[in-house]
Amino acid sequence: MKKRKETGLDFEVDKLTNSIENVKSGDSFPTEISLLTKADLKPLTKKNGWQFNWASEFKAPAREVYKLTITNNPGIIQGIISLEVKTDHVYMHLIESAPFNIGKSKTYLGVPGNLVAFACKLSFQRGGEGYVSFLSKTRLIEHYEKTLGAVHFGGRNMVITTEVALKLTNKYFK
């Protein structure tokens, strides 16, 4: 099996919200995070504006792929995250906001923060004490330190510690 090359995560945290927030109205919408299903994969293509090959990620044996949706609107995926539960933490492989939640004309704020908070929550649930790690693109290291409170652990390695994970999970999951 071909070894995947880890290039580093390239998501920007636009705002830490209490769930996700409509850019125009400022209204907050409660969200749900659930496992991505095979049926969900069909529209998640480069042709539809998605950057990553989620079908390939979905098939990776050690990974769990989750989707973020607005409560009572499960048909529209707001963002996706690929995680691997390790013995002492959760590792974030990929994270992506839906194409309509990226750029100046995005619909909702808070999608990346919501997904990262979920990774922290999963880490608490699976015995990792909230610890989450990921590789960052070099230019975003400082951004993740400021917005998420992640710790730069050398090279491009980033870690979210228990204390920060608690803040994130308490913000998004009451």
Image: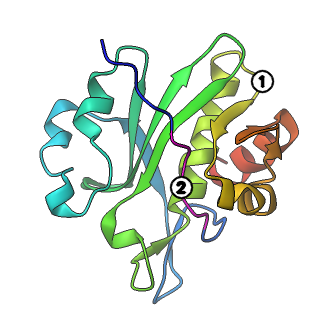
Name the spot of residue 103 as percent of width and height, x first.
Answer: 43, 78
| Amino acid on which disc 2 is placed | Asp
Q: Residues in magenta?
A: 7-13
Would you name the residue on which mark 2 appears? 10
As drawn, is 167 to the left or to the right of 59?
A: right
Q: State the residue in front, 120 or 171.
A: 120
Q: How is the image coloured?
A: rainbow
> Is residue 29 toward the left or the right of residue 14 in the image?
left
Q: From the image, which quarter does the N terminus lie in? A: top left
Q: Residue at x 72, y 20 (%)?
A: 128
Residue nearest the viewer, comparing 51 with 14: 51
The residue singled out by tag 1 in the image is 129
Query: Are there few (<14), some (14-19), or many (20+) residues within 10 Å of tag 2?
Result: some
From this viewpoint, which residue is outermost toward the right?
Answer: 163
Quarter of the figure with residue 88? top right
Q: Does label 1 or label 2 sit earlier along the sequence?
A: 2
Q: Is residue 79 above or below residue 49?
A: above
Mark 1, residues whose alpha carbon is within 10 Å: few (<14), some, or many (≥20)?
Answer: many
Quarter occupied by residue 129: top right
Q: Position of residue 165 (x, y in %)?
A: 76, 40
In terms of secondary structure, what is the magenta stretch mainly? loop
- Farthest bottom residue? 24
Magenta-colored stretch includes residue 9: yes
Q: Position of residue 155 (x, y in %)?
A: 75, 39
